[in-house]
Image (tube, grey):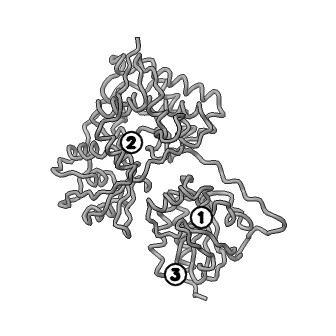
């Protein structure tokens, strides 16, 4: 007989935090400014049994379909019946026996925690691939307007886990959150949504669990869309996940750091990299306002390339030192931007979209370029390719960026003669309005080269 293992609802304090996040509540969080946080230390985890053949299969699948950035190629996975079958078999094997139904099969606490993380991620993958193609976890909700997005996947789907009926929310909250004293595990759980932690490219096991959880937490904190400091606005914008589990995170880091008055800043600084940490310390000491992004239920996936816009008649494609075409586009606030405004400046024109992961990685870096060079006559304009204005407006409101963002839902600017076929695509335009450099994609080496080209154009005499 199956045991019905379903909590009636989320704990009261989590429901309150979630409500505040959705309502866009803001609060000022302060932390101790007495000293810089010490590195986090964790208890030693004893080795467990060797990796199973099942984990080896899952590792192979993740290596094949999950990028180093944690993005899943659902389309490619769905197109391989053999690999879909392998995922199904792996998931069914996990469901046969859990640490609750067969405790002797798990060497220690780390092996048990690794099992629950792998089960959560495998079930998310299986259910999304079964319903592919979908664009959002909204596809799991059939209860109409007003129903929580993604509720179907997280709440309504139940699985027989070693004879117990559980949802993904049960596994996340009632098992992982309540039974294991390690909040880092929450950053290893991937439900598929944009706001969810990224999917690790390998299964978890007891041998490397501590290191892997540390890496997952560090990766989450250092993603710009999870933690962003906006100096001009005196604001810190955080992921809603950090809002939901704020109390757990603060308690955890307070115990690890032995800090008498820990705050969310204490936790963030324990995991912030060298680029983020100074800005967070300044925000903490300056008592910046802290806000949380709304949860983004869109599917986190590899996006297909943008179809090249058709070239009409004999309109030529730009090749070489051609002028930037005349453009007039609306900003999210309704005002008009004109390409004529770029004359006399070195301008980076960024064709991007809110659904494009590399675009979002590049965006804050381009904002930094503008801050670094704007006094020398440099500017950035970001031409959004989203077919709807709403996500762009939400992005601008959440990020308070200094970049000039304009809307191109009909792709008139990215069409002929520019013929932008890949996002992101950047154009570097000199002071006379001539396109001097064009590049597709984004990486750190790309950014380094772009800086050199910007500095070279700024060094040229103004017209």
Residue that numbered label 3 is attached to:
377
Q: CA distance from mark 3 to mark 1?
A: 23 Å
**Badge 2: residue crowd in 10 Å (few <14, some 14–19, many ≥20):** many
Q: Is residue 429 visible?
A: yes
- Give whichever of 10, 103 is nearer the camera: 10
- Compared to residue 316, the image places residue 18 above or below, namely above
Q: Is residue 256 left or right of residue 242?
A: left
Residue that numbered label 1 is attached to:
407
Q: Residue at x 58, y 87 (%)?
A: 462
- Horizontal and vertical percent for residue 351? 61, 63
Q: Residue at x 48, y 48 (%)?
A: 296
Q: Earlier in the sequence, mark 3 or mark 2?
A: 2
Q: Is residue 182 left or right of residue 383?
A: left
The quadrant in which residue 387 appears is bottom right
- Give whichever of 293, 39 is nearer the camera: 293
* Residue lying farthest to the front in this orientation: 145
* Residue lying farthest to the right in this orientation: 313
Residue 187 has which mark? 2
Q: Residue at x 64, y 83 (%)?
A: 432
Disc number lying in front (1 or 2): 1
């Amino acid at each position: 007989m199956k045991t019905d293992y379903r909590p009636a609802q989320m704990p009261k304090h989590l429901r309150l935090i979630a409500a505040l996040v959705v309502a866009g509540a803001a609060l000022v969080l302060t932390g101790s400014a007495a000293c810089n946080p010490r590195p986090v230390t964790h208890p030693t985890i004893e080795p467990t049994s060797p990796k199973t053949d099942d984990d080896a299969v899952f590792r192979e699948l993740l290596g094949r379909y999950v990028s180093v950035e944690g993005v899943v190629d659902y389309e490619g996975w769905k197109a391989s019946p053999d690999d879909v079958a392998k995922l199904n078999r792996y998931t069914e094997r996990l469901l046969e026996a859990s640490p609750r139904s067969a405790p002797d099969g798990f060497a220690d606490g780390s092996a048990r925690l690794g099992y629950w993380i792998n089960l959560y991620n495998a079930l998310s993958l299986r259910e999304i691939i079964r319903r592919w193609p979908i664009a959002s976890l909204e596809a799991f909700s059939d209860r109409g307007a007003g129903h929580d997005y993604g509720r179907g996947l997280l709440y309504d789907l139940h699985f027989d886990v070693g004879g117990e009926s559980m949802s993904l929310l049960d596994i996340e909250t009632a098992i992982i959150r309540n039974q294991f004293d390690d909040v880092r595990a929450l950053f290893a759980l991937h439900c598929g949504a944009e706001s969810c932690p990224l999917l690790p490219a390998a299964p978890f096991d007891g041998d490397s669990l501590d290191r892997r959880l540390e890496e997952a937490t560090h990766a989450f904190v250092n993603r710009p869309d999870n933690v962003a400091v906006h100096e001009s606005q005196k604001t810190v914008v955080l992921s809603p996940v950090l809002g939901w589990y704020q109390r757990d995170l603060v308690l955890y880091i307070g115990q690890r750091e032995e800090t008498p008055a820990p705050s969310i800043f204490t936790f963030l600084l324990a995991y912030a990299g060298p680029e983020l940490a100074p800005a967070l310390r300044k925000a903490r000491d300056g008592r910046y306002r802290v806000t949380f992004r709304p949860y983004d239920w869109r599917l986190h996936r590899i996006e297909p390339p943008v179809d090249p816009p058709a070239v009409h008649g004999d309109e030529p494609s730009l090749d070489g030192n051609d002028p930037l075409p005349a453009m007039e586009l609306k900003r999210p606030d309704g005002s008009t931007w004109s390409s004529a405004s770029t004359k006399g400046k070195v301008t980076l024109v960024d064709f991007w979209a809110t659904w494009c992961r590399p675009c979002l990685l590049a965006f804050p870096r381009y904002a930094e370029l503008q801050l670094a060079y704007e006094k020398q006559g440099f500017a950035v304009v970001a031409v959004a390719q989203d077919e709807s204005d709403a996500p762009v407006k939400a992005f601008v409101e959440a990020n308070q960026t200094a970049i000039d963002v304009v809307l191109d839902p009909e792709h008139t600017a990215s069409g002929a003669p520019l013929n932008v076929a890949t996002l992101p695509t950047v154009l570097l335009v000199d002071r006379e309005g001539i396109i001097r450099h064009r590049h597709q994609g984004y990486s750190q080496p790309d950014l380094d080269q772009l800086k050199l080209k910007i500095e070279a154009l700024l060094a040229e005499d103004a017209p």
